[in-house]
Image: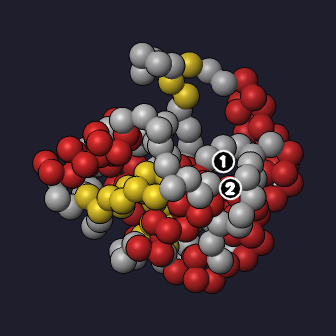
Amino acid sequence: EEAVQSVMDQTVSPAEIIVVDDGSTDASAARMRALCEKHPQIIFWSQPNQGAHYTLNAGIHRATGEFVSILNSDDAYCRTRFEECLKIFQRRPDVSAVATGLTFIDENGVEISNPWYEDARAFYDRTQDLSLALINGNFFVTTSNLFARRAVFDEIGHFSPLRYTHDLDFFLRLVNAIRPARGA
């Protein structure tokens, strides 16, 4: 609910909100159905557990908007995320995807440090080699960090059926297909 609420609270409203329950065994599906009654713009379905790659791809295939932003159930967006990402796309029509910075929080929502992330990000800052830095330590961390033109998935494909590295595989294919814009 908190993840979905962070999408609904954006300063720029999304064209659509697609939520896929990938076989959760808690009360998530029931809570989402209740949320859908209050917010009919949410597209929701449950499926037997298929894995993250399958679930992400199912949502992307259902999406109709120009942009796709992925949010995992244990993450939340800052209120201005969509607005800030869209500004980059408006300024730079040649940009196909944006990965944003991350803030780590504890169970109470208090910002905490993450030394692993800080080291992985510092490696990129030193080398300025995005592919090498992602292989060294995937400082993009999560698919929730991706905001992309929907056309990107048509160009480079969707998430591969890899249990733990579907995100890294996708990010590396993305970096290989498009030149990252510096200072965007």
Q: Position of residue 157 (x, y in %)?
A: 65, 77
Residue name at image x 56 percent, y 38 percent: 102
- Number of numbered discs on residues: 2
Rendering quarter of residue 89: bottom left
Given residues 91 and 41, the one toward you in this image is 41
Q: Say which amino acid is labelled 2.
A: Asp
Q: Nearer the viewer, residue 36 or 100?
A: 36
* Distance between mark 2 and mark 1 Cα atoms: 9 Å
Query: Which element is circle 2 on?
Result: helix
> Where residue 8 sits in the image (x, y, percent)?
26, 48
Which quarter shows the C terminus? bottom right
The image quarter containing residue 175 is bottom right
Q: Residues within 10 Å of mark 1 (few under 14, many from 20)?
A: many
Residue 183 is at least partly visible in this image = no
Quadrant the N terminus occupies: top left
In this view, which residue lies farthest toward the left?
38
Question: Does residue 9 appear left or right of residue 83 in this picture?
Answer: left
Q: Quadrant of residue 85?
A: bottom left
- Side (left or right) of 163 relative to 126: left
Quick one: 34 or 175, which is closer to the camera?
Answer: 34
Asked if one can make out residue 115 in the rendered structure from this viewpoint, the answer is yes
For marks 2 and 1 on the same chain, the one whose residue lies earlier in the sequence: 1
Q: Amino acid at mark 1?
A: Phe
Q: Where in the figure is residue 58, as x and y percent of width and height?
A: 50, 68
Residue bearing mark 1: 140
Q: Secondary structure at mark 1?
A: loop
At label 2, counting other C-alpha atoms closer than 10 Å, the crowd grade (few under 14, some 14-19, many 20 or more) is many
The residue where tag 2 is placed is 167
The correct choice, above or below, for 12 with respect to 174 in the image is above
- Is there a contact, CB below 8 Å, between mark 2 and mark 1? yes
